Each structure stands twice: as structure tokens, then as C-alpha cells.
Image: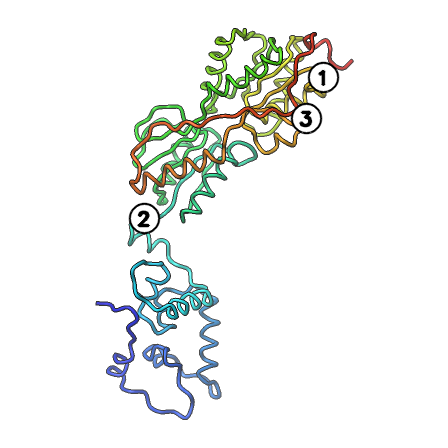
Amino acid sequence: MLVAGLRYDGIAQKRFGAPKQSPQPGPPPEQHRQSWLCQPMAPAGMDWKDRRMKQKRAMANEPVSLKKLAEHLGLNPATVSVVLNEVPGRSIPQTTRDRIKSAAKELNYQPSLLARSLRNRRTLTIGILVPQLGDGYHTQVMGGVGDHLMEAGYFYFTAHHRHQKNLIEEYSRMLLGRGAEALIAIDTLLEHAFSVPVVAVAGHRTIKGITNVALDHRFAAELALMHLYSLGHRRIAFMRGQPFSSDSDERWHSIVAAARQIGLAIKPELIVQLDRDISSPELGYPVMQQLLSGGREFTAVVSFNDMSAIGAIRALQDSGLRVPDDVSVIGFDDIQAAAFNNPRLTTIRQPMANMGRIAAQCILNRLQGSERFRQQITVEPELVVRESTRAINLAPMTGAKRKK
């Protein structure tokens, strides 16, 4: 049985005999005698202090194992492991704990996460699937996920798939094959169940074992349309989201239902379809140009997201129209750039970072068995009124009223 703090003095003496007295000073008492006796002879004139400094420099330049660290300290490896892993309920003097941690830092000891995971059958690793790594919605959700996992002591891998079905399937397998204990999918269309806990942010499909964290899109649509309706807007243009985006269908169906509820007619000729897989204002610029080139009359625009709204505003301005004096524009998401656009963007706020934290905590609860499975977690949107919307002018804007 291993005893915490046991030293090897007696064993070394039985095996090798007591060390002979030498006119030179011997190693410090805590030095492992067996290790000391097995060291090569030092050059003439080098005392034990020189040898120890040389040994420290050599150890600092290469990975130091737990065994080597324990030998350096003259302690049982089990004792060192208990201290470095913060194992509770062990009676080890604080001075010993401090000495172990100081030596581990000095010698650049790095724990073997692979060995630890094999012992505990835990990797403390989560896999994250996301369409792309860029500004906007995905980044802010990921920020919430990452911050929460790090606070909980978890590591995570991220794989971006550009909405390609084959990559979603392949990367899911790869993440699990690399030890991920669970998956978090952000704006990713999942098609089947998994053998581990899964949370889908912006997920809308009912799949066994997958928890969806989603916005209340019906309420969001009501907030956006009622805001414009209350300002007098009746001829409103709409941007539909890309077919591959998880929220596209749910958001559009919610807009149609909310418009019907308040008696607002949606004109087919005022609907434009987004189709590009980009996360920049360039997303909304060409579709707004398309809308303007047809000479269609409208006084407001409901954009699929903030990026497309910012692009639409630039296209309107380049055409000689003023926002919001001539056309009001409302976005969706409330990304960080929305408050700094010119004009500052009125939008529907999704609590994106909080949605990421909710997803991460849901995964942790399921891994720890502290919460029953939940199929759906719904979060509330918020209308943020800034500078890009205002009460309607009497005359609707058309392509004919653009810059001459």
C-alpha cells in the first residue's frame, strides 16, 4: 500500500548500504538517495549544488514526468499526484503542498491529460460544430459557450463545416473519436441522434437525445412587425434567410403568422431571398440593389439578420436614399457592430452569449446527471430601438426616387 509522504531512505540503505562519509557536502536530506547514487560521477571540482543546478536546467528544457518530479522532491508519486490534482480529503501538510506546486512550476511539469482520461474515463472535452468562424452571431454564441466551459474546467474542440452535410457528419465522428464527451451544435442542421449528450443552439428539429436552445421566433416577429406597424409602415420589404440556415424557416413562418395576426399584407414582389454563405454586410447589399432596380415601392425593410441589414443600408445610401428618413430598416440578432453602424441599427436582440452559456450548462448538467433531459429551452427576444427606424413619410419610396 502506498502511504502519502513516505520516503525511501530505508530502502536505499538496505539495497546499497549507508552512504560513506565524504569531505564534500552531501545532497540535501529530501533528495532521493537511490536517484543520487545512480547519478554519473561529476567532473572534478563540481559539488552537489552544481550538479543539482545542472539537473534542474536539463529538466526544465524537456517534459518532466510525475515520476521524475516525485524523485526530485524525494516524495511518493502518489503524494505528488494527490496535490497536483487537488484530490480532496487527503491530509498533507500545507508546506509539502506548496513545495510540490513550486517545484512543478519551476520544472515546467505538464500533466498527461491522456493518462488522466484513461484513469478516470473522462476527457473533460466538448466538441463544437459551427458553420464558420467569423464576426456576428456564431462568434458571440461561441463566446458564451467557451467562457462557461473554461470556468467549469473543460476544454473544447471547434470544427466549422460551412453548412456542408458531409462535413457535419464527418466532423461529428472525428470530434467523438478524439474524446469529446458531448457535442454543441450552433446553427447546424443535425439529422440523427448521437451516443453522447447533444445541444443544438438554433435547433428546431425534434431528435431523440438532442436539446434545442432556440429563440421565441413568434414573439420576435411580433416585436419587429408591431414596431414598424406602429410607425405607420404598411409596404414592407422582407429578406428571407438562406435555406441552409437553421433559423430561416422558423423565422419566416413566424413573420407570416405575425403579419396575418395584425392584418399586414406581405407582397410577394417585396420578398428577396438570401443565398450566399457569408457573414459580412455583403450579404444584404446585392439583394437590396435587386429590390431597388425593380422600381418597387416600400417604406421599410425587415432584414434576416444584422449583417444583411447593414449591407442593405449601404445599398440604400449608395442609391441616394436616406435611412431612416426615406426607408426604415430593422435587423435581427443585435451583434456588436449594430450599435456602431451609421445609423445605429434598430434590431431584435437575441441573447447570443447567454444562449451559449445555457447550452454549455445544459451539457454539463447532463454529463453530471444533475438534470433530466429537456427537449427544448426557449429564450426571449428583445426589441432594441436605435436610429434606423422612424415614423413613415407620406410618400412611399421607389426606385424612381433614387439618386439622379
Nearest-to-viewer mark from 3 and 2: 3
Which structural element holds mark 3?
A: loop
Q: Sequence order check: which comes first, mark 3 or mark 2?
A: 2
Count of numbered marks: 3
Q: CA distance from mark 1 to mark 2?
A: 59 Å
Q: Residue at x 31, y 43 (%)?
A: 368
Under mark 3, the amino acid is: Pro
Residue 286: give x, y in percent of width and height: 63, 20
Q: Mark 3 packing: few (<14 Cα in 10 Å), some, or many (20+)?
A: some
Under mark 1, the amino acid is: Leu
**In front: 238, or 180?**
238
Q: Mark 2 packing: few (<14 Cα in 10 Å), some, or many (20+)?
A: some
Residue 70: give x, y in percent of width and height: 35, 69
Q: Which residue is mark 3?
A: 343
Q: Does the CB distance between marks 1 and 3 fall below 8 Å? A: no
**Quadrant where the N terminus is found in the figure:** bottom left
**Quadrant where the C terminus is found in the figure:** top right
Q: Quadrant of residue 66?
A: bottom left
Q: Residue at x 70, y 15 (%)?
A: 326
Residue 122, which numbered label? 2
Which structural element holds mark 2?
A: loop
Q: In this rendering, would 204 be left or right of 349?
A: left
Q: Sequence order check: which comes first, mark 1 or mark 2?
A: 2
Q: Which residue is mark 1?
A: 321
Under mark 2, the amino acid is: Arg
Q: CA distance from mark 3 to mark 2?
A: 50 Å
Q: Does the CB distance between marks 3 and 2 fall below 8 Å? A: no
Report the coloring of the rendering. Answer: rainbow
358 to 72, vertically: above or below: above
